[in-house]
Image: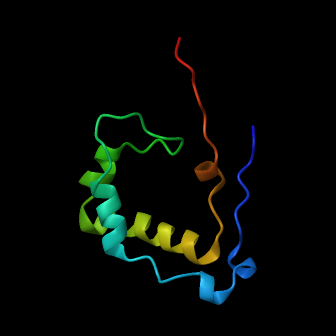
Amino acid sequence: MEELQLENEAMVGSDEKGPEVLEAEIEAAIGELKSGKAEGVDGIPAELLKALGERGRKEPVGLCRSIYVTGDWPVDFIKSTIVTLE
C-alpha cells in the first residue's frame, strides 16, 4: 500500500498556508455528504454527521481546523481500502 506524504505546517511558507478554515465551509461540506453510502475507515455515516446539530459539530470543526493548521493528519484519515467487485 502506498502511503500519502503530507507536508507539515513548518515545511510550508506562511504565505502558502491560506486563510483559516471557516466553520461555514465545514458545515457546507457536511451538508453535501451523500446519505445511504458506506462510511469510511472512521466508521461514521454521513447521516450521523448531518444529525449532530450545531453543538455536535464542534468536534469535527475543531479537528478540521487542527489538521489544516498543523498539517498532522490522523493515521486513519490517510488510509484507504479498495475492494474490487466482480
19 relative position to 10: left or right = left
71 relative position to 22: left or right = right
Could you tell me which residue is drawn at 51 percent across and 45 percent down? 42
Residue 1: x %, y % from top left? 75, 37
Instruction: Give the quadrant of residue 56.
Output: bottom left
The single residue placed furthest to the top in the displayed view is: 86
Front in this rendered view, residue 25 or 74: 25
Front in this rendered view, residue 14 or 42: 14
Residue 74: x %, y % from top left? 62, 58
Q: Is residue 38 above or below residue 46?
A: above
Could you tell me which residue is drawn at 59 percent across and 30 percent down? 82
Q: Is residue 40 above or below residue 65?
A: above
Could you tell me which residue is drawn at 47 percent across and 82 percent down? 20
Could you tell me which residue is drawn at 34 percent across and 59 percent down? 29
The single residue placed furthest to the front in the displayed view is: 16
Q: What sort of colour scheme is used for the picture?
A: rainbow
6 relative position to 21: left or right = right
Instruction: Give the quadrant of residue 2.
Output: top right
Residue 16: x %, y % from top left? 61, 82
Front in this rendered view, residue 70 or 19: 19
Residue 12: x %, y % from top left? 70, 79
Q: Is residue 31 above or below residue 64?
A: above
Q: Is residue 59 above or below residue 46?
A: below
Number of numbered discs on residues: 0
